Amino acid sequence: MHRRGVGAGAIAKKKLAEAKYKERGTVLAEDQIVQMSKQLETFKSHLEEFASKHKQEIRKNSQFRVQFQEMCATIGVDPLASGKGFWSEMLGVGDFYYELGVQIIEVCLALKHRNGGLITLDELHQRVLKGRGKYAQDVSQDDLVRAIKKLKVMGNGFGMIPVGGSYLVQSVPAELNMDHTVVLQLAEKKGYVTVSEIKDSLKWEKERASHVLDHLLKEGLAWLDSQAAGEPQYWLPALFSELTSRDITPEEANQMTP
Amino acid sequence: MDRFSWSNGLLEINETLVIQQRGVRLYDGDDKAKLDVGVVLLSTHRLIWRDIKNHECCISMPLSQIIFFEEQAAGIGKSAKIVIHLHPPLVNKEPGPYQHSKYSYIKLSFKEHGQIEFYRRLTEEMTQKRWENTPVSQPISTGTGSQGGRTRAVGIVGIERKIEEKRKETDKNISEAFEDLSKLMVKAKEMVEVSRSIANKIKDKQGDITEDETIRFKSYLLSMGIANPVTRETHGSGTHYHMQLAKQLGDMLQAPLEERGGMMALTEVYCLVNRARGMELLSPEDLVNACKMFESLKLPLRECRVSEKGSLTAEEFAKLLGLSVLLSKERLLLAEKMGHLCRDDSVEGLRFYPNLF
């Protein structure tokens, strides 16, 4: 970007523009920027006052956090955009959510070998709470959802898939289109799904069902139980992980059929 | 009056309140009792009296003490009364306001009327004798007489009051917080509107602004958390803050990157940096915006978007980094050796995947 306003001709031009605008009574952008800096100082002191009285409320009360976030969204402000923002610096909202982001990433990373990078919001919530310890502040599912929305900007496939009234959290860049999503939703009740079930419920042809299931296998999101009575079952670790009591180590995972 | 015991005034389980009447003074026989005017309560099991002003002054007597009772009409300057004749006090009776009395009857003086209804109800209860069907627990020995009864009342009532006060205070705090929050949001909205007006002017070129002013404006937007509405520049939000951050990252990530064969996922960087900071953490957007400045600041780091397929060939990598294909292949092979990547050698070529195992 070249420096504007340099050179005699440019200066004269600028003075002319200033004169024109002052005549008409409108304020120039640069004057307004100076104004804004003053208004910002005023706002900052209001925020400081608010923080001195209610900072605790934000930390302790998840309902209050929801209200706060929604109000910000309504007026077009993102309190989590930057750690350097006033909201973050003075209210401490930033640290709360950014740290949560770190914890979410770590949980997803630790379980990726088993569930392929897909986990229910419930399980994620439980594991994050466990990791935080019993003396840490409480964290709600709404808090997790907001933190995840922020993580999306870093790529890496973070996203959320609506399933069975809640969400599956995706943490790998696996391509999941509507077909995959629908099959995941179908599998939600039992933790597994078969080709016949897909054909019956969704009225798809065998090829379409197989194609989707093969993709889920390839991405490591589904495991095949070919020994199942009847027909092969496609299990989704992300969904049945709450039922299994034992965590599988990466070595064991290698020996199974992903 | 010596048939009464100190009480906390709380009804037992199975005991029901039948009627209560305020403005009642007690008489020990024909003498005014050394108590003030209060409230008399009739339950299925007891006769209870409580001082109107001092709620902790509360006495009761089991209805089984009553032999019979009669009305005494009002006179000039005299309220209507109910005279109650009583059995002798029980041996294990709990202490009360009177150790001893020469009378075997008491009077209830109804200064605010209500005697007719009270009499009727008392008759009913004495006829039904409901206390015989549903016995209540014996009163717990409260220690030193009058003190004991009062302390118990204070204890329970006190705790209940504290809980109620705390609840009210919490409610008050929250509603005050919401009110203050709403006011704050009104002010924040004004800031948003000002910034939009400025952005429009910049677009319409109403007065040229310098690069310094542009940077300053961007930093104001950053402080408020307002998205930059002006341009989609390649330097992202491009404030001094991000430039500083980019330099810090350049220093901080040298060693970790070498350990990992030259490549790290952005989420990995995010965790590493924030864990190291402990507080005043970076937002994901801060990190992304800082990375965008690597090139212009001529730092030896580059942010690259791994393709949607989640894998790279040497050519794709070379293009991203602006390196020769030979160098980029070398990098990938090194990362593979370190275990960060694994290869997929097929007819379509050699692709490298992040090693998830």
Image (cartoon, coloured by chain):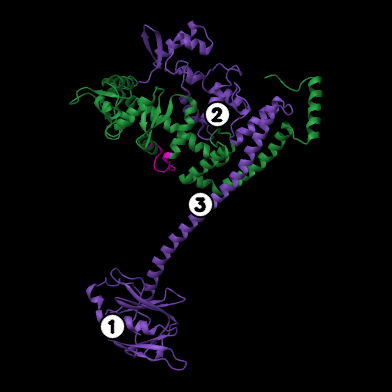
> How many neighbours does mark 1 have within 10 angstroms: few (below 14), some (14-19), or many (20 or more)?
some
Q: Nearer the viewer, mark 2 or mark 3?
A: 3
Kind of residue at badge 1: Gln
Check if mark 2 and mark 3 are on a common chain: yes
The secondary structure making up most of the magenta span is: loop
In the image, the segment drawn in magenta is A130-141
Judging depth in this view, the residue of B130 and B262 nearest the camera is B130
The residue positioned farthest toward the left in the image shown: A229
Kind of residue at badge 2: Asp
x and y, in percent, of residue B266 in the image: 48, 23
x and y, in percent, of residue B18 in the image: 33, 75
- Give the chain ID for the green colour: A
Chain identity of mark 3: B
Label 1 with label 3: CB-CB less than 8 Å: no
Q: CA distance from mark 1 to mark 2?
A: 82 Å
- Label number found at residue B65: 1
**Residue at label 2?**
B286
In the figure, the shade used to draw chain B is purple
Answer with mark 2 or mark 3, whichever residue precedes in sequence: 3
- In the picture, the quarter occupied by the C terminus of chain B is top left
- Label number found at residue B174: 3
Answer with mark 1 or mark 3, whichever residue precedes in sequence: 1
